[in-house]
Image (spheres, rainbow, N blue to C red):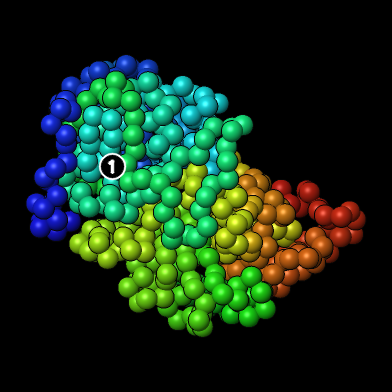
Amino acid sequence: MADENRTQTTENRIDGSVPVQDAETLAASIPADATLAVSGFGSVGYPKAVPLALAESDRDLSLTIVSGGSVGEEIDTRLVEAGAIERRYPYQATPEARAAINEGKIAFHDSHISRLSDEIELGQHVDVDIAVVEAVAVGDDWFVPSLSIGPTPAYVAAADRLIVEVNDSLPRDLEAIHDIYRPARPPNRKPIPLTHPGERIGTSRIEFPSEKLIGVTRTDRQDTSYTFREPTDDDRAIAANLLEFLADEVRDNPVFDESIQLQFGVGSLGNALMGALDDFDFGDREVNYYGEVIQDGLLDLLDDGLLNAASATSLALSEDGQERLCSDIDRYAENVVLRPSDISNNPALVNRFGVVGVNSALEVDLYGHVNSTHLGGTHLMNGIGGSGDFNRNALVPIVALSSTAKGGAISRIVPMVPHVDHTEQDISVVITEQGVADLRGCSPRERAEELVEQCAHPDYRADLRRYRERAEDEGGHIPHDLERAFKWQSDE
């Protein structure tokens, strides 16, 4: 972050009556077997100093860590390497955490992001001892989150105690982007009064009972921000196929006569697809983003005047993207809104806005079932995140992925996925660099033909055709040759 941004934002961050302590003292106050709910989503906005102090202590720790989305190496690398994490909810994105989970050293439970706030606040998974959160400002009974919100309001409500890290490397002015709205608990929950993706219905601060606050510490440690790879040839071909599909959809679907609401999954492919929208002619339609994360590609669309509003729960930006946003917050705050994840991913709102959701996956089978999380059906990659929230509830749910992996050695269109995160009923369209399979209204056998002929790589089409033929000889509504399906997985 630019030096001038750091300097201008170190003032008016901590209310004079709030106790400020060093991270080591606060870490020492955390019980060895505590359940910690930490802020952070999209590898930004997570606490750094206190987790690092825990990792560097000589205590024998068996912590339960609950985050919303991915967090940085201070938590999911350093604490893992220290053997300090016993249980992890519900998402991780580092090789170290992934290995420990797959080896059975860390117990892991996955969850849809839209449900997580209720699950934690209502005690359906764990009882939170302490919430540890990052902020850009704090008072006796409030704080302003930093670059993400996620389920943090629910974590603070659920926790017995609270520790706040104020990050001096980030602008205090991030407050202008936040919109914190908390729905009431069931059964007294009313409809969320949000009628447009750019509308604001809440406040800029998260409030808490003052007696919860253990203490505050300061840090200037920066996020483990995203590094987006340059778009590959496959990325560009997928983007071209997506734009061709969107052109037909906005022309033929009356829902999009006046506006279109888009969502993209996090990662390099999602960022590349966002960037490709620069080349799309939306006519006089209003274009909005209603999703989980804002990435660099959306900043490009905002700068070019192609996007009216961008609503999410995290600014999952590269280092350059963070600096770009933080150096011009007042301008971006006119169009960018960060919300809690139970609002950004809320099924009723995704449905209300008629979102076109574009998410990736590890593999798709011939009948449209999708595996997003487990290699070979057994080894966890990251977690389901918010993909289920959008795949199940979007007006047009799209899965975008390359047709092969490992330099063409593995087909990602397979006879039968060994792990199902999204069923055939959840997905409308599959797009690869080979083409588009519009599965709406298709029978299972028709789906299989579409996916083989439109989305599979030519090197694998003959084998997939033979599989279809053998499976159809066996009969059934969803024909399978189970022996061959499992052999396909073991061969790959």
Nearer to us in this view, 240 or 463:
240
- Quadrant containing the C terminus is bottom right
Q: Where on the picture, by quarter, is residue 50?
A: top left
Residue at the image position 50 percent from the left and 60 percent from the top: 196
Give x and y (percent) for residue 193: 52, 50
> For the residue carrying disc 1, how many other residues have a C-alpha within 10 Å: few (<14), some (14-19), or many (20+)?
many
Residue 282: x, y in percent? 51, 79
- In the image, is 264 to the left or to the right of 135? right
Q: Position of residue 140 (x, y in %)?
A: 23, 29
- Could one spot residue 427 in this view of the protein? yes
Instruction: Name the residue beneath numbered marker 1.
Output: 144
Q: Position of residue 425 (x, y in %)?
A: 72, 54
Along the line of sight, the residue nearer the viewer: 76 or 81: 76
Residue at the (64%, 61%) spot, across then down: 395
Q: Residue at x 28, y 37 (%)?
A: 143
The total number of labels drawn is: 1
Q: Does dot 1 land on a helix, a strand or a loop?
A: strand
